Image (cartoon, grey):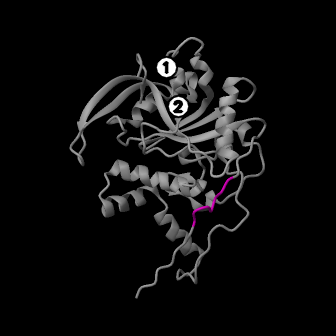
Amino acid sequence: METTSYLCISGLLKARPAEEAGQRMLYMEASNEAIDLQGDRVLAKSLSDSADHFLRYGNLDLDHRTLIPPRGPGDNPYLWEIGRPIDAKIDGTATYVKAQLFTGEGQMADNANMVWDSLTRINPPARWYPSVGGQILERADEIDPMTKARVSLIVNVRWTNIGLSRNPVNPAVPSVATVPIGTLAKCCTPGGIDLAKALAAGYGTDAARLADGAALRVQSLDPALQGTLPGPLTLPDDAAVSEWLAQRLRPAALAHELEARYGFPPSEALAMARRFLRDVFTAAVPEILNYERI
């Protein structure tokens, strides 16, 4: 009988976020091209074309409340704003965003504090899911090859908002993180996830004040041992182990396995693979007027 060896890596990286110089950052896969609950598919190119507009004028709020007109006397939508975008990058079909939460006093700061505390000061942390919002400028229709259902493609948008929600319209997006993920993480390379880079600790520098690649440095590692190998490993040396892991810890490779084994469509398989790898490296526990949740 063939003996199988297992390598447990969940919890291998358990970053402990901290407020540095009062700056609090959130990282998220804001969108992908999976079909959402409204039967829409937001093309990454539409967000990429509007990314500069989003970075200059966009905001971060709770459930898109800043995009919705006042619900009654005394309701100020702007009080639901909790932060602003710092960076946005496109990686294939996924859109990654780095955002900064507000600090200070008042209702806007109170809401931002609530989100941060729910992510960093309770165990298990709360799960907030990003949802992109703005104005849809152009749609196109297609037929999904798997379900044969009609899908509405969103091909042109004016992207202005990300709303943090407990019930996102796109269930394929993972929850927000307090450590860099996706193309915003230095351990993610064009060839896949570089495990050696993911294990490299930072230098104790204030990442919130750094720019470019320095701002994406991994700052903390869990000092306790989180995973072990049960029994002797049959691979000959560390180089062989690294090569074995590198061949498997790539979103495209995992997505191919999901397609072959379970028949998932390519876009959903890739989204699931990215979500799984993101959870591994962050140790996750598990329309009004022209406004639309896109």
Q: Which residue is mark 2?
A: 163
Given residues 19 and 98, the one toward you in this image is 19
Residue 168 percent location from the top left of the image = 46, 38
Does residue 23 sit above or below 230 in this rendering? above
Q: Residues within 10 Å of mark 2 (few under 14, many from 20)?
A: many
Q: Residue furthest bottom?
A: 1
What residue appears at the point 68 percent right and 48 percent down from the top-left corner? 122
Residue 85 percent location from the top left of the image = 59, 31
| SS majority, magenta | loop
* Element on which disc 2 rests: strand
Quarter of the image for the N terminus: give it: bottom left
What residue appears at the point 67 percent right and 51 percent down from the top-left corner? 218
Q: Which residue is mark 1?
A: 68
Residue 47 percent location from the top left of the image = 44, 31
**Residue 14: in magenta span:** yes
Where residue 286 is drawn, which disc sits there? none
What residue appears at the point 42 percent right and 49 percent down from the top-left corner? 271
- Which mark is first along the chain, 1 or 2? 1
Given residues 116 and 216, the one toward you in this image is 116
- Residue 191 in view here: no
Q: Residue furthest left?
A: 148
Specify the quadrant of the image occupied by residue 141.
top left
Specify the quadrant of the image occupied by residue 143.
top left
Q: Residues within 10 Å of mark 1 (few under 14, many from 20)?
A: some
Number of callouts: 2
**Which contiguous range is marked in magenta?**
9-15
Q: CA distance from mark 2 to mark 1?
A: 11 Å
